Amino acid sequence: MVDETAIEHDDAGLRRSLKNRHLQMIALGGIIGASLFIGSGAVISTVGPAAVLSYALGGLLVVLVMRMLGEMATAAPTLGSFMEYARTSLGDWAGFTIGWLYWYYWVGVVAFEAVVGAELLNPLVPVVPQWVLSLVLMFALTATNLVSVRSFGETEFWLASIKVITIVIFLLCGAVFVLGLWPGAEFSVGNIARDGFVANGWFAVLHGVVIVIFSYFGTEIVTIVSAESDEPERSVAKATKAVVWRVLLFYVGSVALLVMITPWQQIPVESSPYAAAFSRFGLPGAEVVVNVVVFTAVISVLNSGLYTASRMLFALQRRRFAPAWVRDVNRRGVPWKAILLSTLVGYVAVAASYVSPDTIFYFIINSAGAVALFIYAIIAASQLRMRRRLEQRAPERLKLRMWFFPYLTWATLVVIAAVIVTMGAIGEVRSQLTLSLVSLVGILLVYVLFVRPRRRSA
């Protein structure tokens, strides 16, 4: 077992050119995706006003995992983040598994977001086939990532800024509206409990947690980006401490306002409930503006997904968990082969979405459905082991500590297990769990059959 107190800080040729403002905005924007702007309507339809609880419970789980990750990342900021912590804490199998699961997840997300982005663009340029638009988006964001990490950081900074500004405006306008202070508005806070707060029952609340937990996935990107930051420890500590209020404001707060502004039965499912809410404010062009913001959110996820997948692949190679040729870095400090391999798989997935949407693309997207939960579980298990060893060997490195250790860590693992079991009990997401387990078993088999024997003989 490797000593966690001696984790390497070598960045293997990457440039530390990201500033604190980049990391903070990436952290802010990382929690706001298209799933919030559009998917929240489906969650409210399923759960009722108690969707606020679903978002709060899912957010609490993410807050706890991010606190654990923040503790490890400030104690030992390193390329690969939780892949490296899993490897040093639990063994090579854990590092290999979590690293490839994470890469696989983001490659699937990149393809999915490219398809969604093309669907949003298609009404504007109907003469261009959607698959061409998907490829154009992929090419554009690949180019951004290939230029330099600073180029990625600046692009993500402005994309995230648009999302954050939109949510802040919604929170301010929404609060004034529900209090009856908006011109023509009436006091409507009571809408949240008009037909009963838990209108569809408590199991629906758990069902909602299963749906929303994946909306939060992406907050952990900041600990990976920190490897190319000029102040990794300070930036990660600041970002992980702020995750609590980000969850409360952006998700719980905005969803609560949605069900206060409009009776929950009237909130749209297929279109954005935020666009509908802005329309109630009487703001001109609200739907167009929100659609632009949704497109921005899609591009932001596509941009950060390409970055994250390539950096995880690069980190895997450093531990000989990936082909040696992906380690090549150009003169601007960009791991260009890792980026191209990640995008190549994305191109294949985009092609499959049009050639074989019900088989290949279905498998790629749904087999990553529960991956976030597997990754969270390995992060929690890593923190349990790493914290104890750091307390024994280098307590001065624990600048940011997990609350009520080890009780909250164990509680987090129990909750993750409960969410996984709940997925198995819900028909509409059961296939995601099944296919995700297939992905997990497949990666473990690759390690056992090919990687472990090679490492033992080396």
Image (cartoon, rainbow, N blue to C red):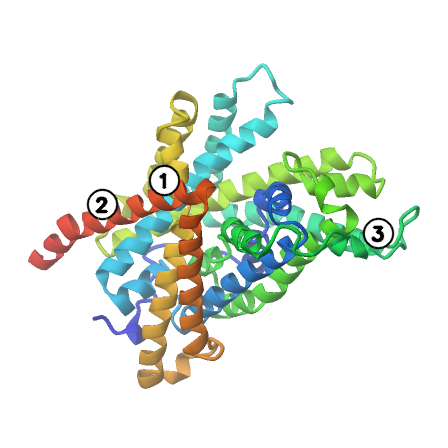
Report the front residue among 19 and 353: 353
Q: CA distance from mark 3 to mark 2?
A: 56 Å
Q: Kindly identify the amino acid type of the residue bearing the numbered disc 1.
A: Ser
Image coordinates for residue 231, horizontal then vertical, percent: 49, 66
Q: CA distance from mark 1 to mark 3?
A: 45 Å
Q: Secondary structure at mark 2?
A: loop
| Image position of 224 with respect to 185: above or below | below
**Circle 1 residue:** 342
**Circle 3 residue:** 177
Image coordinates for residue 20, horizontal then vertical, percent: 55, 62
Q: Residue at x 63, y 22 (%)?
A: 123
Report the front residue among 155 and 420: 420
Mark drawn on residue 89: none
Q: Nearer the viewer, mark 3 or mark 2?
A: 3
Q: Residue at x 35, y 33 (%)?
A: 344
Q: Residue at x 80, y 51 (%)?
A: 173
**Circle 2 residue:** 323
